[in-house]
Amino acid sequence: MKLLIVGGGAREHALAWKLHRSPRVDLLLCVPGVPSYAVNLPGSLEDLEGLASMAADNGIDLTVVGPEVQLAGGIVDLFEARGLRIFGPTKAAARIESSKAFAKELMSKYGVPGPDFKVFRDHAQARSTLSKHDGPVVVKADGLAAGKGALVCKDRGEALQALEECMVTRSFGAAGDTVVLEEYLEGPEVSVFAFSDGAHISSLVAACDYKRLLDGDAGPNTGGMGSYSPPEFWTPALAQQVRDEIMTPVVAGMATEGSPYRGVLYAGLILTSQGPKVLEFNCRFGDPETQVILPLLKTDLVDVFEACIDGWVDRLPIEWEDGACAGVVMTSGGYPGEYTIGLPISGLQDLDHDVQIFHGGTKVVDDAGRTRFLTDGGRVLTVAGLGPTLAEARNRAYENLKRIVFEGAQFRTDIAFTRSAATAGRISHG
């Protein structure tokens, strides 16, 4: 088979690494590109028609989409209209991420547990409601906002300021024209993933991620500073509860609404005293969770994708390794603010066999016939360690991370260490 990956971050590099290992894959292409495992093609992620033509012209058997923006923009609908096979949800199904209001209303209709919420499309009405509210609340821009549209507010003043940011100054553009005001909840958070063919779902896999820049969950929010799988609190009983109360009803509800969900469904959950509740749904693989989940997957990923497309997920046993994986993200100095790019990276060749490096923000250059890597983004690398236990996986990740050097490198030193760290998760509620 010839496969095409759409996207170019660490998530897509992890997908390329996994797909490259499949005996079913003869050629792997990627746009705009990853540093290894695939042949890179020039192209714009915004040009969906161009991507479809690229797939057709290159005889691609299956396209895999990484980023949510393209899924929300209808890339799957476009490819399918041209008779091209592609993994991911349609534009209508991707609304589960692209519209928080849609997701909340779907959950409410089909009895999926989540925080109490109200949806507003009028600033004055939202402001009036917040003016009567005491205590913490979450203000969310309805649309896609690059992970920055969920604002956790400790009091009324912060909430009113967040509302102003969404609907008046429009810091998130059209994404903030509609807002969701959401009950603030506390508890451990976990990312849960299932593959769906529109009618059935696979077994679940879970990971914990870290959004804050600094140890102890301090500092600003980021795109993700690390992750690990499986969480120490993820039991068979909890997995069954999440499957029965959340994932199955949502997939069934989407089908009933005429938007069957085919792809990977990502639920961001919080574990409350009343049970697990949904903070958000995403319509794609997570980053940095993908970098720790795929190394644990035993089943051929091509088989998984085809089962989702063709409707036989219920007949495919999806198996996972018994061990654990811990991934630590190395970022440029200054991230998530301003940072310098073009800095040389050393030590990438001096790593153990049970450690994988996934590139998120690097550039390959030819230096007198010698390949060198330079920094080229905020989140530069994910260092993922495998081991029979979480402690061993974590130690391997950090031991190898020490061998990688670039000026100003930042990373957390507490990834996958304690349950308290695991509870930090998505402090921004998405």
Image (cartoon, rainbow, N blue to C red):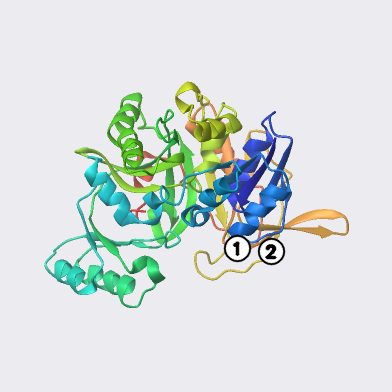
Q: Position of residue 281 (x, y in %)?
A: 37, 47
Query: Tag 1, which secondary structure?
Result: loop
Residue that sits furthest to the left in the current view = 132
Which quadrant does the N terminus fall into?
top right
Residue at 57%, 26% in the rendered image: 298
Asked if 240 appears above or below 170 in the picture, the reply is: above
Q: Name which residue type carries label 1.
A: Gly
Residue at 36%, 38% in the rendered image: 255
Q: Position of residue 83 (x, y in %)?
A: 60, 44
Query: Tag 2, which secondary structure?
Result: loop
Asked if 105 appears above or below 233 in the picture, the reply is: below
Q: Nearer the viewer, residue 106 or 273?
A: 106
Asked if 88 appears above or below 376 in the picture, the reply is: above
Task: Indicate left or right for 221 with 320 as reference.
Answer: left
Q: Position of residue 309 (x, y in %)?
A: 52, 35
Q: Do tag 1 and tag 2 residues touch (Cβ < 8 Å)?
A: yes
Q: Name which residue type carries label 2.
A: Leu
Q: Nearer the viewer, residue 200 or 326?
A: 200
Task: Indicate left or right for 53 with 419 as reference.
Answer: right
Q: Residues within 10 Å of mark 1 (few under 14, many from 20)?
A: some
Q: Check disc 1 and report the residue beneath it.
A: 408
Mark 1 or 2: the one toward you: 2
User: Is any atom of residue 65 visible in this view?
Assistant: no
CA gap, disc 1 and disc 2? 9 Å
Task: Indicate left or right for 114 with 212 as reference.
Answer: left
Q: Nearer the viewer, residue 407 or 422?
A: 422
Q: Check disc 2 and report the residue beneath it.
A: 343
Q: Position of residue 58 (x, y in %)?
A: 73, 47
Residue at 24%, 67% in the rendered image: 159
Earlier in the chain: of badge 1 and badge 2, it is: 2
Q: Residues within 10 Å of mark 2 (few under 14, many from 20)?
A: some
